[in-house]
Amino acid sequence: MKTRRLLWLFAAVFACCVSQFVTLAQESRPTVKVHTPGPSILSVVFQIAEEQGFYHDEGVNVDFLTMPTGAGIQALIAGNVDASQILGLTLRAAINRGAPLKIVMVFNDRPTYWLMTKKEIASPDDLKGKIIGSSSPGASSDVLLQRWLAKHGLAPRKDVTIVYIGATAVNYQALVRGSVPAAVLLPPFESRAKVEGFRELANFGKEDFGPFLGGGVSVSDKFLRERPDAAARFLRATWRGLRFFKTNRKGSVAISAKFLNLQPEVAESVYDGIMPLFTDHGYNSDNWQAKVLEHEVGRTDKSLVQKTFNFSVLRSLK
Protein backbone atom coordinates (compact mmCIF):
# COMPACT_ATOMS: atom_id res chain seq x y z
CA MET A 1 0.00 0.00 0.00
CA LYS A 2 2.81 2.34 0.95
CA THR A 3 4.58 1.55 -2.30
CA ARG A 4 1.43 2.35 -4.29
CA ARG A 5 1.08 5.71 -2.53
CA LEU A 6 4.70 6.52 -3.31
CA LEU A 7 4.12 5.65 -6.96
CA TRP A 8 1.06 7.93 -7.10
CA LEU A 9 3.04 10.72 -5.45
CA PHE A 10 5.90 10.25 -7.90
CA ALA A 11 3.48 10.30 -10.85
CA ALA A 12 1.83 13.49 -9.59
CA VAL A 13 5.17 15.24 -9.10
CA PHE A 14 6.35 14.08 -12.53
CA ALA A 15 3.16 15.33 -14.21
CA CYS A 16 3.52 18.69 -12.48
CA CYS A 17 7.14 18.99 -13.61
CA VAL A 18 6.24 18.10 -17.20
CA SER A 19 3.42 20.67 -17.18
CA GLN A 20 5.75 23.37 -15.88
CA PHE A 21 8.39 22.40 -18.44
CA VAL A 22 5.88 22.65 -21.30
CA THR A 23 4.67 26.03 -20.04
CA LEU A 24 8.23 27.33 -19.81
CA ALA A 25 8.99 26.00 -23.28
CA GLN A 26 5.92 27.73 -24.69
CA GLU A 27 6.88 31.00 -23.01
CA SER A 28 10.46 30.72 -24.25
CA ARG A 29 9.19 30.29 -27.83
CA PRO A 30 6.18 32.60 -28.14
CA THR A 31 3.66 32.53 -30.97
CA VAL A 32 2.80 35.74 -32.82
CA LYS A 33 -0.44 35.92 -34.83
CA VAL A 34 -0.06 38.04 -37.96
CA HIS A 35 -2.82 39.32 -40.25
CA THR A 36 -2.26 39.60 -44.00
CA PRO A 37 -4.89 40.37 -46.67
CA GLY A 38 -3.58 37.47 -48.75
CA PRO A 39 -0.50 36.44 -50.74
CA SER A 40 1.14 39.40 -52.47
CA ILE A 41 4.61 40.75 -53.12
CA LEU A 42 4.34 42.70 -49.85
CA SER A 43 3.78 39.56 -47.79
CA VAL A 44 6.81 37.91 -49.43
CA VAL A 45 8.96 39.53 -46.72
CA PHE A 46 7.20 37.38 -44.11
CA GLN A 47 7.56 34.31 -46.32
CA ILE A 48 11.29 34.94 -46.70
CA ALA A 49 11.70 35.21 -42.93
CA GLU A 50 9.81 31.93 -42.54
CA GLU A 51 11.63 29.97 -45.27
CA GLN A 52 15.08 31.25 -44.37
CA GLY A 53 14.59 30.23 -40.76
CA PHE A 54 14.79 33.75 -39.35
CA TYR A 55 11.73 33.26 -37.11
CA HIS A 56 13.16 29.95 -35.92
CA ASP A 57 16.53 31.59 -35.23
CA GLU A 58 14.89 34.30 -33.15
CA GLY A 59 12.88 31.73 -31.17
CA VAL A 60 9.40 32.74 -32.27
CA ASN A 61 6.53 30.92 -33.97
CA VAL A 62 4.36 32.86 -36.40
CA ASP A 63 0.76 32.07 -37.38
CA PHE A 64 -0.42 33.92 -40.49
CA LEU A 65 -4.15 34.65 -40.68
CA THR A 66 -5.71 35.83 -43.95
CA MET A 67 -8.68 38.20 -43.87
CA PRO A 68 -9.78 41.42 -45.62
CA THR A 69 -8.08 44.66 -44.65
CA GLY A 70 -10.88 46.11 -42.53
CA ALA A 71 -11.54 42.85 -40.72
CA GLY A 72 -7.83 42.46 -40.03
CA ILE A 73 -7.58 45.89 -38.42
CA GLN A 74 -10.62 45.12 -36.27
CA ALA A 75 -8.97 41.86 -35.23
CA LEU A 76 -5.82 43.81 -34.31
CA ILE A 77 -7.83 46.24 -32.19
CA ALA A 78 -9.67 43.37 -30.48
CA GLY A 79 -6.43 41.52 -29.73
CA ASN A 80 -7.31 38.53 -31.90
CA VAL A 81 -4.08 39.08 -33.83
CA ASP A 82 -0.83 40.61 -32.61
CA ALA A 83 0.33 42.26 -35.84
CA SER A 84 -0.89 43.23 -39.29
CA GLN A 85 0.72 43.85 -42.65
CA ILE A 86 -1.54 46.89 -43.11
CA LEU A 87 -0.14 50.42 -42.69
CA GLY A 88 -2.47 52.27 -45.02
CA LEU A 89 -5.36 54.62 -44.50
CA THR A 90 -7.63 51.97 -42.96
CA LEU A 91 -5.15 51.55 -40.13
CA ARG A 92 -4.42 55.24 -39.72
CA ALA A 93 -8.10 56.12 -39.66
CA ALA A 94 -8.45 53.72 -36.73
CA ILE A 95 -5.45 55.33 -34.99
CA ASN A 96 -6.91 58.80 -35.55
CA ARG A 97 -10.14 57.60 -33.90
CA GLY A 98 -8.15 56.56 -30.84
CA ALA A 99 -7.29 52.91 -31.49
CA PRO A 100 -4.10 52.05 -29.53
CA LEU A 101 -2.08 50.82 -32.50
CA LYS A 102 1.41 51.60 -33.80
CA ILE A 103 3.32 51.37 -37.05
CA VAL A 104 6.59 49.62 -36.18
CA MET A 105 8.05 48.68 -39.58
CA VAL A 106 7.72 50.00 -43.14
CA PHE A 107 8.30 47.75 -46.15
CA ASN A 108 7.56 50.23 -48.95
CA ASP A 109 7.22 54.01 -48.80
CA ARG A 110 6.04 54.47 -52.38
CA PRO A 111 2.80 53.11 -53.89
CA THR A 112 2.84 49.62 -55.36
CA TYR A 113 -0.46 49.83 -57.23
CA TRP A 114 -1.16 49.65 -60.96
CA LEU A 115 -4.34 50.53 -62.83
CA MET A 116 -4.74 47.78 -65.42
CA THR A 117 -7.34 47.94 -68.19
CA LYS A 118 -8.57 46.21 -71.30
CA LYS A 119 -6.51 46.99 -74.40
CA GLU A 120 -9.18 49.25 -75.89
CA ILE A 121 -8.85 51.61 -72.90
CA ALA A 122 -5.80 53.59 -73.96
CA SER A 123 -6.29 56.88 -72.09
CA PRO A 124 -8.04 58.23 -68.99
CA ASP A 125 -10.87 59.59 -71.17
CA ASP A 126 -11.58 56.05 -72.35
CA LEU A 127 -12.63 55.19 -68.79
CA LYS A 128 -15.75 57.36 -69.00
CA GLY A 129 -18.82 55.26 -68.41
CA LYS A 130 -16.72 52.30 -67.31
CA ILE A 131 -16.47 50.26 -64.10
CA ILE A 132 -13.22 50.10 -62.10
CA GLY A 133 -12.54 47.37 -59.57
CA SER A 134 -11.01 48.53 -56.29
CA SER A 135 -10.29 47.04 -52.86
CA SER A 136 -12.38 48.74 -50.17
CA PRO A 137 -13.62 52.28 -49.46
CA GLY A 138 -10.94 54.42 -47.82
CA ALA A 139 -8.12 51.94 -48.43
CA SER A 140 -4.85 53.42 -49.70
CA SER A 141 -5.33 51.92 -53.17
CA ASP A 142 -8.81 53.42 -53.40
CA VAL A 143 -7.69 56.87 -52.24
CA LEU A 144 -4.84 56.85 -54.77
CA LEU A 145 -7.25 55.76 -57.51
CA GLN A 146 -9.56 58.66 -56.72
CA ARG A 147 -6.65 61.12 -56.69
CA TRP A 148 -5.54 59.81 -60.08
CA LEU A 149 -9.08 60.11 -61.47
CA ALA A 150 -9.38 63.68 -60.17
CA LYS A 151 -6.03 64.55 -61.74
CA HIS A 152 -7.46 63.51 -65.10
CA GLY A 153 -10.80 65.25 -64.62
CA LEU A 154 -12.84 62.13 -63.86
CA ALA A 155 -15.37 62.00 -61.03
CA PRO A 156 -16.57 58.77 -59.39
CA ARG A 157 -20.32 58.11 -59.85
CA LYS A 158 -20.48 60.80 -62.52
CA ASP A 159 -17.84 59.67 -65.03
CA VAL A 160 -16.82 56.24 -63.72
CA THR A 161 -18.24 53.65 -61.35
CA ILE A 162 -15.97 52.19 -58.67
CA VAL A 163 -16.95 48.76 -57.37
CA TYR A 164 -15.32 47.42 -54.22
CA ILE A 165 -14.40 43.81 -54.89
CA GLY A 166 -11.84 43.10 -52.19
CA ALA A 167 -8.32 41.67 -52.26
CA THR A 168 -6.13 42.22 -55.30
CA ALA A 169 -6.39 38.54 -56.31
CA VAL A 170 -10.17 38.91 -56.55
CA ASN A 171 -9.83 42.13 -58.55
CA TYR A 172 -7.49 40.33 -60.92
CA GLN A 173 -9.99 37.51 -61.44
CA ALA A 174 -12.76 40.03 -62.09
CA LEU A 175 -10.57 41.72 -64.71
CA VAL A 176 -9.54 38.59 -66.61
CA ARG A 177 -13.08 37.17 -66.53
CA GLY A 178 -14.47 40.38 -67.97
CA SER A 179 -16.55 41.38 -64.95
CA VAL A 180 -14.78 44.76 -64.93
CA PRO A 181 -12.81 46.46 -67.73
CA ALA A 182 -10.33 48.05 -65.30
CA ALA A 183 -8.93 47.24 -61.86
CA VAL A 184 -6.33 48.43 -59.37
CA LEU A 185 -3.81 45.64 -58.79
CA LEU A 186 -0.81 44.88 -56.60
CA PRO A 187 2.14 42.83 -57.85
CA PRO A 188 2.33 40.12 -59.02
CA PHE A 189 -1.16 40.46 -60.43
CA GLU A 190 -0.33 43.47 -62.60
CA SER A 191 2.40 41.39 -64.26
CA ARG A 192 -0.01 38.51 -64.75
CA ALA A 193 -2.49 40.93 -66.30
CA LYS A 194 0.17 42.14 -68.74
CA VAL A 195 0.85 38.54 -69.77
CA GLU A 196 -2.91 38.15 -70.35
CA GLY A 197 -2.83 41.14 -72.70
CA PHE A 198 -4.15 43.91 -70.46
CA ARG A 199 -2.81 47.46 -70.57
CA GLU A 200 -0.94 49.33 -67.85
CA LEU A 201 -2.87 52.59 -67.83
CA ALA A 202 -1.19 53.97 -64.70
CA ASN A 203 1.62 53.11 -62.30
CA PHE A 204 0.77 54.93 -59.08
CA GLY A 205 4.38 54.53 -57.92
CA LYS A 206 5.40 57.01 -60.61
CA GLU A 207 2.75 59.56 -59.68
CA ASP A 208 3.51 62.51 -57.43
CA PHE A 209 1.09 61.63 -54.65
CA GLY A 210 3.32 62.82 -51.82
CA PRO A 211 4.63 60.76 -48.87
CA PHE A 212 3.15 57.28 -48.72
CA LEU A 213 2.91 54.28 -46.40
CA GLY A 214 2.28 50.89 -47.96
CA GLY A 215 2.92 47.52 -46.34
CA GLY A 216 4.90 46.71 -43.24
CA VAL A 217 4.08 45.82 -39.66
CA SER A 218 1.55 47.42 -37.34
CA VAL A 219 0.89 46.15 -33.82
CA SER A 220 -1.21 46.97 -30.79
CA ASP A 221 0.19 49.01 -27.93
CA LYS A 222 -0.82 46.12 -25.67
CA PHE A 223 1.40 43.69 -27.60
CA LEU A 224 4.40 46.03 -27.29
CA ARG A 225 3.72 46.69 -23.62
CA GLU A 226 2.83 43.20 -22.37
CA ARG A 227 4.95 41.03 -24.69
CA PRO A 228 8.01 43.13 -25.52
CA ASP A 229 10.31 40.12 -25.93
CA ALA A 230 7.97 38.40 -28.41
CA ALA A 231 7.55 41.67 -30.30
CA ALA A 232 11.31 42.22 -30.51
CA ARG A 233 11.97 38.68 -31.73
CA PHE A 234 9.27 38.89 -34.37
CA LEU A 235 10.45 42.30 -35.60
CA ARG A 236 14.11 41.27 -35.73
CA ALA A 237 13.27 38.22 -37.82
CA THR A 238 10.96 40.16 -40.15
CA TRP A 239 13.61 42.87 -40.55
CA ARG A 240 16.06 40.17 -41.62
CA GLY A 241 13.48 39.10 -44.20
CA LEU A 242 13.29 42.66 -45.51
CA ARG A 243 17.08 42.95 -45.74
CA PHE A 244 17.21 39.61 -47.61
CA PHE A 245 14.60 40.91 -50.06
CA LYS A 246 16.60 44.09 -50.68
CA THR A 247 20.00 42.44 -51.10
CA ASN A 248 19.41 38.93 -52.47
CA ARG A 249 17.71 39.11 -55.87
CA LYS A 250 18.19 35.46 -56.78
CA GLY A 251 16.86 34.13 -53.49
CA SER A 252 13.97 36.59 -53.35
CA VAL A 253 12.90 35.81 -56.92
CA ALA A 254 12.94 32.07 -56.18
CA ILE A 255 10.85 32.44 -53.02
CA SER A 256 8.44 34.87 -54.72
CA ALA A 257 7.96 32.51 -57.67
CA LYS A 258 7.06 29.61 -55.38
CA PHE A 259 4.97 31.61 -52.89
CA LEU A 260 2.98 33.48 -55.55
CA ASN A 261 2.90 30.67 -58.12
CA LEU A 262 4.74 32.67 -60.78
CA GLN A 263 6.82 31.72 -63.76
CA PRO A 264 10.50 32.61 -63.06
CA GLU A 265 10.57 35.36 -65.70
CA VAL A 266 7.41 36.94 -64.24
CA ALA A 267 8.86 36.76 -60.73
CA GLU A 268 12.01 38.49 -61.97
CA SER A 269 9.94 41.25 -63.60
CA VAL A 270 7.90 41.75 -60.44
CA TYR A 271 11.00 41.90 -58.23
CA ASP A 272 12.85 44.35 -60.47
CA GLY A 273 9.82 46.62 -60.63
CA ILE A 274 9.05 46.71 -56.94
CA MET A 275 12.38 46.34 -55.12
CA PRO A 276 13.32 50.05 -55.55
CA LEU A 277 10.06 50.99 -53.81
CA PHE A 278 11.08 49.16 -50.61
CA THR A 279 12.91 50.80 -47.71
CA ASP A 280 16.47 49.83 -46.83
CA HIS A 281 16.07 49.52 -43.07
CA GLY A 282 12.34 49.29 -42.34
CA TYR A 283 11.80 52.78 -40.96
CA ASN A 284 11.84 56.44 -41.98
CA SER A 285 13.07 59.68 -40.48
CA ASP A 286 11.08 61.74 -37.99
CA ASN A 287 10.75 64.44 -40.64
CA TRP A 288 9.30 61.95 -43.12
CA GLN A 289 6.82 60.66 -40.53
CA ALA A 290 5.61 64.20 -39.91
CA LYS A 291 5.24 64.86 -43.65
CA VAL A 292 3.11 61.73 -44.12
CA LEU A 293 0.68 62.82 -41.43
CA GLU A 294 0.61 66.42 -42.61
CA HIS A 295 -0.13 65.27 -46.15
CA GLU A 296 -2.97 63.00 -45.03
CA VAL A 297 -4.67 64.81 -42.14
CA GLY A 298 -3.59 68.37 -42.84
CA ARG A 299 -1.69 68.82 -39.60
CA THR A 300 1.13 67.29 -37.64
CA ASP A 301 2.80 67.64 -34.28
CA LYS A 302 5.10 65.59 -32.12
CA SER A 303 2.26 63.98 -30.19
CA LEU A 304 0.55 62.83 -33.41
CA VAL A 305 3.79 61.29 -34.69
CA GLN A 306 4.33 59.50 -31.36
CA LYS A 307 0.73 58.29 -31.44
CA THR A 308 1.25 56.70 -34.87
CA PHE A 309 4.85 55.43 -35.06
CA ASN A 310 7.23 53.47 -32.84
CA PHE A 311 10.48 52.47 -34.54
CA SER A 312 12.45 51.90 -31.34
CA VAL A 313 13.12 48.21 -32.05
CA LEU A 314 14.06 48.83 -35.69
CA ARG A 315 16.44 51.67 -34.79
CA SER A 316 18.37 49.31 -32.51
CA LEU A 317 19.09 46.81 -35.30
CA LYS A 318 22.27 46.80 -37.38
Image: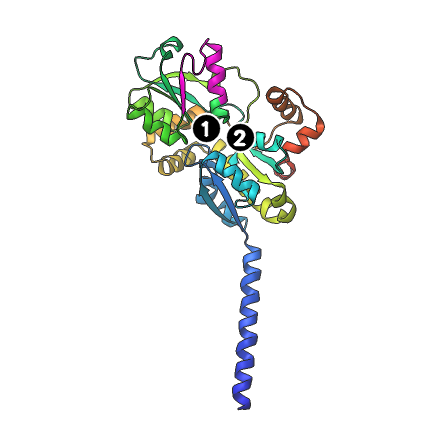
Q: Dot 1: within a 10 Å radius of its alpha carbon, few (fewer than 14), some, or many (20 or more) residues?
A: many
Residues rendered magenta in the picture? 143-163
Q: Relative to residue 5, is residue 191 drawn left or right?
A: left
Residue type beneath disc 1: Ser
Query: Which of disc 2 and disc 1 is earlier in sequence?
Result: 2
For the point 54% across and 41% down, the residue is 76
Instruction: Residue under label 1, please give it.
Output: 136
For the point 30% across and 15% down, the residue is 119
Q: Relative to residue 65, is residue 59 drawn left or right?
A: right
SS at badge 1? loop
SS at badge 2? helix
Taking the view exactly as shown, the residue that stands out farthest to the front is 158
Taking the view exactly as shown, the residue that stands out farthest to the bottom is 1
Q: Nearer the viewer, residue 275 or 37?
A: 37
Residue 153 forms part of the magenta stretch? yes
x then y, percent, for residue 215: 51, 31
Q: Nearer the viewer, residue 161 or 106?
A: 161
**Picture layout, residue 6 above or below residue 154:** below
For the point 29% across and 23% down, the residue is 178
x then y, percent, for residue 10: 55, 79
For the point 54% across and 74% down, the residue is 14
x then y, percent, for residue 159: 41, 12
Residue 19, picture quadrant: bottom right
**Picture layout, residue 84 above or below residue 136:** below
- Callout 1–callout 2 Cβ contact below 8 Å: yes
Residue type beneath disc 2: Thr
Image quarter (top left, top right, bottom left or bottom right) of the C terminus: top right
Residue 52 visible in image: no
Is the image coloured rainbow, by chain, by secondary structure, or in one colour? rainbow
Residue 220 forms part of the magenta stretch? no
Instruction: Residue under label 2, please give it.
Output: 90
